[in-house]
Image: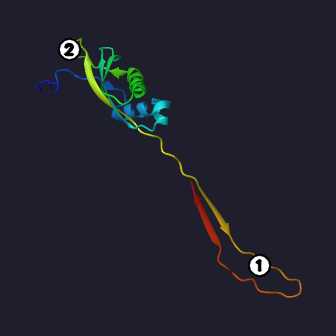
Amino acid sequence: MKKERKDKHFIKKPIYEGGPNALKQFISKNLSYPKETLQAKIEGTVVIRYTINIQGKVVDTKIINGLTPECNEEADRLVRLLQFKVPKNRGFKGFFHKDLHIHFKLPKVATSTIQYTLTPTAKKETTETVPEKKENGYTITVNW
């Protein structure tokens, strides 16, 4: 007769549906960079601690390490949108605390490249036939 195997942890923690990669995708999809911070070209990380109730909803947030007031508000708004899956914990009805780092990075500026190719043309004469010479052309690349 086999013994029943016990769980490794007595209390199971809440998990985001889809795992850490899904959480990163959710943050990158819903994060909007504040205009004032974008114009000032400020980058950084906001560390926020949040509390999850037994239904899996975020009920409280606290900024541990902030950036600007606008970024802190955006991080708070984003964390409050999260929904977690809380497994049954043998009748335990408490709150869970987690920390999250939200990175504010300036969007990459796309550089445009235009190439022009210039090739000399041969002059056509009506009286004589001159064999065409193959000459090298010039390529100009402009980046901005």
Q: Is residue 32 visible?
A: no
Q: Are marks 2 and 1 in contact (CB under 8 Å)?
A: no
Q: Which residue is mark 1?
A: 122
Residue at (43% x, 26% y) in the render: 70
Q: Is residue 2 left or right of residue 129?
A: left
Q: Position of residue 119 (x, y in %)?
A: 69, 72
Q: What secondary structure is marked by label 2?
A: loop
| Residue nearer the viewer, 98 or 74 | 74
Report crowding for label 1: few under 14, some 14 to 19, many 20 or more residues within 10 A (C-alpha).
few
Residue at (41% x, 28% y) in the render: 71
| Residue nearer the viewer, 80 or 138 | 138
Residue at (48% x, 45% y) in the render: 108
Q: Is residue 94 visible?
A: yes
Report crowding for label 2: few under 14, some 14 to 19, many 20 or more residues within 10 A (C-alpha).
few
Instruction: Answer with mark 2 or mark 1, whichever residue precedes in sequence.
Output: 2
Residue at (50% x, 31% y) in the render: 35
Q: Position of residue 22 (x, y in %)?
A: 39, 33
Q: Is residue 29 positioned above or below 89 on the image? A: below
Q: Position of residue 2 (x, y in %)?
A: 12, 26
Q: Quadrant of the N terminus?
A: top left
Q: Residue furthest front?
A: 40
Q: What secondary structure is marked by label 1?
A: loop
Q: In the figure, residue 106 lies in which quadrant?
A: top left
Q: Is residue 1 left or right of residue 111?
A: left
| Residue nearer the viewer, 33 or 12 | 33
Depth-wise, is mark 2 or mark 1 nearer the camera? 1
**Mark 2: which amino acid?**
Arg
The span from disc 2 to disc 1 (Cα, nearest Å) is: 89 Å
- Return the mark for residue 37: none
Q: Which residue is mark 2?
A: 90
Q: Is residue 70 left or right of residue 129?
A: left
**Mark 1: which amino acid?**
Ala
